[in-house]
Image: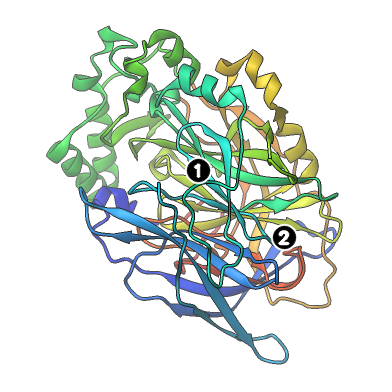
Amino acid sequence: MDRSPFLDGWRGESVNIMAVVRLHKRRSAPTLQAKLLGHTHLGHVNHEDARLFKDPRGRVYVYLALPMGAPPKRAVINTASRVLVHCDAQVTTCDVTLGFPRFLFYSDSMAMDKNWVPWNGTTLMSYSHYGTLGPHSVFDWKSYDEPEPHTGFDAVADHPIFQLLEERYGKLLHLSGGTPAILEPGGRSFLAVGHVRAHPGCFHPEATPAWLHPSVGLGQTARTHGSELAEAIAAAQGEESGGLAALAGLIGPTWSQGVKTTCAALVRAGNTSQKQSQLREAFLFRHLEDVGVHYPLEYAFFFYRFSATPPYNITHLSHGFIPDTGQPASHHTGIVFPIGLERLGSDDSEYLITYGESDQASRVLTMSAADVDAMLQPLDDWMREPESYTVCALQCAGDVAEGHGDDGAEADHADTSGTVGLRAMGRGTTLGGARRRRKRAAGVQGQGGAGAGAQAEAGAGAGAGGAVGIARARRLLGRGQH
């Protein structure tokens, strides 16, 4: 990857590609195969945060937040569009087009309302309350051919944990929507992956707020501003070794030893006003001998489960997690965004999660259903220890490789060549230590937006069926290198 678009102020070209990809996995093989069947360019209009889902008739739609205007007068409109796929008789090549957008009208929608959550196979959709996730508020559009305008919600399910998290964390930690929700086996609940937006001072001492450790003098030592940061980045790109040395010099000595970098530490130290603070500028951070440039926020994933019957109570929530790719600090920008969720395997024993990284790359992660279930905790448990909420690095193993889409292969439902585990992320450490090789899979990718998920063309699983996505075509060349 080249540098993340946020370093260019998102002033580059908005390139969007919609693609049809077949995903499958042989039984007992650790490799998830991906074959490109067809693609089309969508032009230079940015399609942000796309989510693929199916309506009750099994037709594939994509939820899009379409941007209008430019900062500071920027807004988005929420839409749903048909994804039309036409394949040859052998399903070896496919054409894909995007239908006309249908406006999802909500009278109280704010200018930047987005990240709504479609429920796969239904006309229901969750509204994202930024910061608290809940109360769980639900629209029923009745039909995506002609969505019914809304002046309110069709169902609302509250729980005191949402208000408690807002009181404890303020803007230091936000929970919001991410992937579409999919029905779990048994039909009693839905599962989805949300996204966490956290103050990077929860994890990187270089971004620690001055009010937590006044003697640090964050403004003078750890963060670089304006032209100084731009010059340092340019130097790092122009001359690899000298540039990194220049970046490291701007960070200064290891002043941060002893500074606790957890969200709980910020919560305990800050008052109500301080907990409303947000970092507004990129910052430099160091891990071992490498230096990275970090977005002003830290993004992560979390799982949540909610009831499939009204009023659709959210019942379980997981800690936050970040895919651990083993890349150096210079590749960690703090931006990972979950977009797609699908069951994998004939026995639904795995989940496939697609996500965008650094607003540039579309990636795929598989996890066993047992690991996902173990991560979910009842909301009542969170009521007892709300400050225990944290974000971990998820160590990954296995491959995603280009394949030929052998239709005769059986769908695999075994472990993907390694155990999924959680490792605490914090105290100034960044992501590292994975054992994963992978090649770029398909998703939705536009400059300024993240990758969208693979959606099976036939059946509930993404095992041997065709998958639809939108991606910026790039190749991942081996173990964590680009």
Instruction: Please say if 384 is above or below 119.
Output: above
Q: Residue at x 41, y 51 (%)?
A: 107
Q: CA distance from mark 1 to mark 2?
A: 35 Å
Position in image of residue 454 (x %, y %): 61, 63
Q: Residue at x 55, y 57 (%)?
A: 478
Marking on residue 31: 2
Instruction: Please say if 78 is above or below 378.
Output: below
What residue is disc 1 on?
A: 128
**The N terminus - image quarter:** bottom left
Image quarter of residue 122 = bottom right
The amino acid marked with disc number 1 is: Ser
Q: Nearer the viewer, residue 171 or 295?
A: 171
Q: Is residue 209 left or right of residue 165?
A: left
The amino acid marked with disc number 2 is: Thr
Q: Secondary structure at mark 1?
A: strand
Q: Residue at x 41, y 69 (%)?
A: 16
Q: Nearer the viewer, residue 232 or 48?
A: 48
Marking on residue 157: none
